[in-house]
Amino acid sequence: MSRHTSWRAGGPARYYATPATPEEARALAAWAQRAGLPLIWAGRGTNSLVRDEGYPGVVAAYRAQAWQLDEAGETALLRVEAGAPMAGLARRLCAMGWAGLEWAEGLPGTVGGAVFGNAGCYGGDTAGVLHSAELLIGERVEVWPVERLGYGYRTSALKEQGQAEAREGVASPPPLILAATFRLTRGDPLALVERAAVIAAERKGKTPSGSSCGSVFKNPPGESAGRLIERAGLKGRQVGGAVISPLHANYIVNMGGATASDILALAALARAEVWARFGIELELEVRVI
């Protein structure tokens, strides 16, 4: 899975699949269930880490990317399939003069991943602009309004359900996000493109070079996870091929040849030191498989 995750680390999955239609996804889930194999929908792997032991089932990335914009005067509804990249979508909408997703300029990952984890940055998040999501649940396609997704900071009802079922060893196929519909408003294309360029420059200035997953930990209420790790004196701390970035302490970077165990050891060290010094418990933002 090091080939399919942005950290470029982690063990093998027994099977890896890339369905591109609801029918292919439904067939894959049915096959995995008949074979007694656990199944994980993992997107493009920008917020995931597979342990070195690997995963004994199926890891699948849904690839459909089509989108449709329905305009109604000064507003519009954008339906986009879950495999579409968020950053490219944000840039295109800005150039077309539609506001709502400009905060996602440079955001790694797909629409499905953003909906699953309530991705957000630079004053915006998925929950703030999402209208509804289409889910494949078993054999059925259901449309959930944003309220049903139970959004919180970097989490959703789907994410929490998945974590609970993983702990309990539930074998049934998890829901798959097929598409999302976003609410947009008309704006000035030049201003939106300029705003996106500012965000892109700021993101580039804060992003360490090397392979990473972005922020490792959620920010605790009223705090910055990166600043807490920095105050704990951990910038530059290295285990194997992984290092807590000297540029941004909430990034763990694979400098080459890092294992998942190296990365998890640094994450555990950061959590332990921040707890010991400040009494604050850091919570992982990434999913460990």
Image: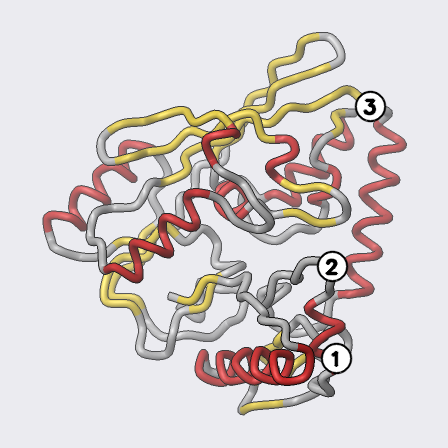
Residue 2 seen in the current view: yes
Report the residue at 68% width, 58% height from top.
Answer: 221
Tell me whether circle 1 and circle 3 mark residues in contact (CB < 8 Å).
Answer: no
Residue 66 seen in the current view: no
Q: Is residue 70 left or right of residue 53?
A: right
Which is more toward the observer, 38 or 170? 170
Lower position in the chain sequence, tag 1 or tag 2: 2
- The kind of residue tagged 3 is Gly
Q: What separation in Å lies between label 1 and label 3 (alpha carbons)?
A: 39 Å
Residue beneath disc 1: 230
Tell me whether circle 2 and circle 3 mark residues in contact (CB < 8 Å).
Answer: no
Provide residue 208's location: percent of width, then percent of height.
72, 71
Q: Residue furthest top?
A: 73
Q: Which mark is residue 222?
A: 2
Provide residue 229's location: percent of width, then percent of height.
69, 78
Looking at the rendered structure, the secondary structure element under dot 2 is: loop
Residue beneath disc 3: 187
User: Quarter holding the C terminus?
Assistant: bottom left
Q: What separation in Å lies between label 1 and label 2 (alpha carbons)?
A: 16 Å
CA neighbours of label 1 inside 10 A, class few (<14), some (14 to 19), many (20+): many
